[in-house]
Image: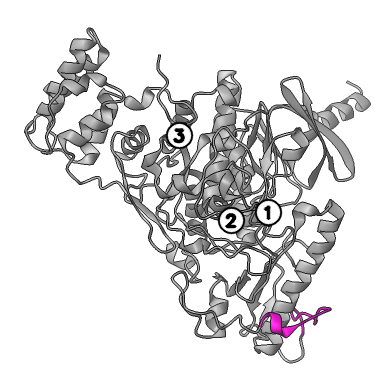
Amino acid sequence: MTEKLLFLLIFFVCLPVAHSQNQVDILIVGGGAGGTSAGIQAARMGANVRILEATPWLGGMLTSAGVSAIDGNHEMPSGIWGEFRQRLRDHYGGAKVLATGWVSHTLFEPSVGNRILQEMADIPNLDIAFNAVYTDVKKEGDGWSVTYKQNGKNYTSKAKILIDATEIGELLPLVGADFRLGMDAKSDTGEKEAPEEANSIVQDLTYVLILRDVSGDSRLRGNDKKGLVKKPKNYDPKAYECACKREGGEMFGSVSDCQQMLNYGKLPKNKYLLNWPNCGNDFYLNWPELTLEERKEKLKEAKQFTQGFVYYIQNELGFKNLRVTEEFPTKDNFPMIPYDREARRVKGKVFLIVDHLERPYDFNLYKTGIAVGDYPIDHHHDKNPNAPEIDFINIKVPSYNVPLGSLVPEKIQNFIVAEKNISVSNIVNGATRLQPVVLGIGQAAGALAATSILENEKPSEVSIRKVQLALLESGAYLMPYFDIKPNDDGFVAMQRIGAAGVLKGIGIPYKWANQTWFYPEQIVSEYEWKQGLLPYFPELEKVHASGSGITLKFIDDAIETIDKNRPNSAILKKWSRFYNLQDFDKTSSLNRRKVSIITDEILNPFEIEIDWEGNLIKK
């Protein structure tokens, strides 16, 4: 082999995968919370995945936007969110070390979050193109072609499935998907809490900054001004003067002093996250009506506004020991992106509205759940005087789940959404936009896309139950049960029986951490079990059921009734083996955990297919 040929061989072998392989199964635009989670899940399931991320980091709002104080899901460590949190605990030395600020149980340095996500994403089948900005998106046959620029060069990736995981739903208008934007009218959603007329108003965004307490740093004494900000143009201290005077309220209570205001987002290592809504650094930007260049200019104003807040803290309030720290790989020490709380929202197979959250068991949509949340409906509109007065935070909902159909557009095939751009009402977005929920949405998008590839079906044709099974196998929650943890031996069975609607939970709106209780130790009545199974086994109508606790003997009689109508059924064979092996009292009442395990194992109602609305598909 000549020296020239050897050089060429080495050159081509060493080409980055991102550019040497043009075709992938799944292409994800956006490596934020949803996109990263989607990529990890799909790659773990065996699909060939590429993520295009415009920054050098993974994590989006979690890291690149600097919002590293987790809102909600403290008692529901579902799937990839639970993995990420455990890695944070391992890094810092336990759960207590992360509970540094009073806004959250889990606070961390954004740079650490990015490193952990990159470690989690360093797996086979997953390629990530950093600093990659898409320039063109085209439909090609049943698939997609996306051109992007990276390090001054243009590349093209082709994929069977395209996922929009951008922070504001950037791809929706480009691919021709119908979407909603801004506040929905009451007549459009049927929500009694919605305004009478629709508008294009979106939530305030925030450019956060990370400060560090340098009081004990001998290198910063005397006249050293490193980390002190200059007074910005158009600085007005009145914009921030009520920052330490938050009135009492159900959510946060009153803020007694400025130190307490700062402790709101205190991070490990004596750092402080500035993401303060009350006379703080929230900023209204009417981006739906701006061009890309106009948005960039207005974001400069948002940065200046946050700079003004820091100047106020350092000079008006006297906290000169708090200095801007070099947390991000940027020249100005600001995060790489702003924290956008709202996006274009696709019109999906289903439309999740506040009624579904308030009264989940009045509908069947909960049966299609793929991600869970417990944070209240929290909207930020303080900086826009034209926003309708809606008391969002007092719209009471229990913990909830997100339906799979909200990730799948009505009309566009082989296209999925995986961020704040899912099919929800404007009001519901105030709950589903939070970090753990978006991680769960992304994981579900990845599971849906990978199942589509593995089954050689379009995402709109894939079995909902198969996607849910893939998520359960990955430790994710389908149902938002506060009192069942993944290490419970009956976790999967209780999730499946809950998602089948056989046994229902009890939802409780509870401050900033809403709940749904399954009560695994509670005795199940014969009547409750029978009613839950009737849609699957109409034969049970003939069985007399009382309000007494269910026993193995009652289940035995019920299965015998089912078998009479389904001769040679595998159900009776499985049941006979189980029943005869039990050496305990067959007349003792059974709790919800045991009933779930038995019902799931023997009758398996979860295997019966459902449609996007959660209704049984009759065969």
What secondary structure is found at the residue carrying circle 3? helix
- Nearer-N-terminus badge (2/3): 2
* Left or right: 476 as drawn, with respect to 596: right
- In the rendering, which numbered label is found on residue 199? 1
* Left or right: 596 as drawn, with respect to 499: left
Task: Give the residues drawn in magenta, as a range.
Answer: 225-240
229 relative to 613, above or below: below
Q: CA distance from mark 1 to mark 2?
A: 9 Å
Q: Position of residue 427 (x, y in %)?
A: 55, 53
Amino acid type, label 1 = Asn
Residue at the location (56% across, 22% down)?
461
Q: Position of residue 36 (x, y in %)?
A: 62, 44
Could you tell me if residue 263 is visible in this image?
yes
| Magenta highlight: main SS | loop
57 vs 512, nearest the viewer: 512
Could you tell me if residue 331 is visible in this image?
no
**Magenta-span inclusion, residue 229:** yes
Q: CA distance from mark 1 to mark 3?
A: 30 Å
- Nearer-N-terminus badge (1/3): 1
Q: Tell me the colour scheme of the image.
A: one colour
- Do the residues under discs 1 and 2 have CB atoms within 8 angstroms? yes
Q: Which residue is mark 3?
A: 368
Residue at the location (75% across, 33% down)?
175
What secondary structure is found at the residue carrying circle 2? loop
Neighbourhood count class around disc 2 (C-alpha, 10 Å): few under 14, some 14–19, many 20 upward = some
Q: CA distance from mark 2 to mark 3?
A: 28 Å
Amino acid type, label 2 = Pro
- In the rendering, which numbered label is found on residue 195? 2
338 vs 26, nearest the viewer: 338
Amino acid type, label 3 = Thr
Q: Position of residue 560 (x, y in %)?
A: 15, 17
